[in-house]
Amino acid sequence: MLTAAIAGLGGLLFGYDTGVIAGALLFIKTDFALGSFGAFWFYGAIGILTLIFCWKLVPETKGKRLEDIQVEFQARVDRRKASA
């Protein structure tokens, strides 16, 4: 039987390899479709949108206990259900 640590490491490496290969293939297709200049602008725009998303929608968790974070997320879910 594999231990949990070895199985976790295998999953991590498989996921990393898969992400690298998929990213490389996607970049090649984007580069072909938009050209090198367009591909870098496209990925730059995605990076800026990701930064804005994280800044606006991802809550700060530094110094908070796990229970406090869970309460905060549950309050968000309850507000959305109440407004729907």
Image: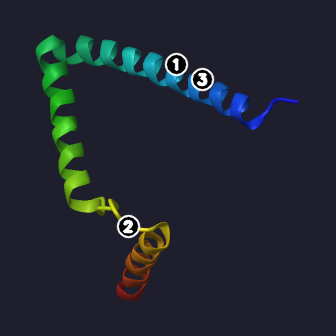
Q: Secondary structure at mark 2?
A: loop
Could you give the CA–CA distance between mark 2 and mark 3, rounded to whole angstroms? Answer: 32 Å
Considering only vertical position in the picture, is 39 above or below 53?
A: above
> Between residues 57 and 35, which one lies in front from this camera angle?
57
Q: Amino acid at mark 3?
A: Phe
Q: Residue at x 17, y 12 (%)?
A: 35
Which corner quadrant of the image does residue 81 belong to? bottom left
- The circle on residue 14 is 3
Location of residue 30 in the rendering, given as x and y in whole percent from the top left corner: 27, 19
Among the two numbered marks 2 and 3 on one chain, the one whose residue lies closer to the N terminus: 3
Q: Which residue is mark 1?
A: 17
Could you give the CA–CA distance between mark 3 and mark 1, rounded to whole angstroms? Answer: 5 Å
Does residue 15 appear left or right of residue 36 in this picture?
A: right
Depth check, mark 2 against mark 1: the one in front is 2
**Residues at discs 3 and 1 in contact (Cβ within 8 Å):** yes
Q: Amino acid at mark 1?
A: Asp
Location of residue 12 in the rendering, given as x and y in whole percent from the top left corner: 58, 29
Q: Residue at x 43, y 74 (%)?
A: 68
**Quadrant the C terminus occupies:** bottom left
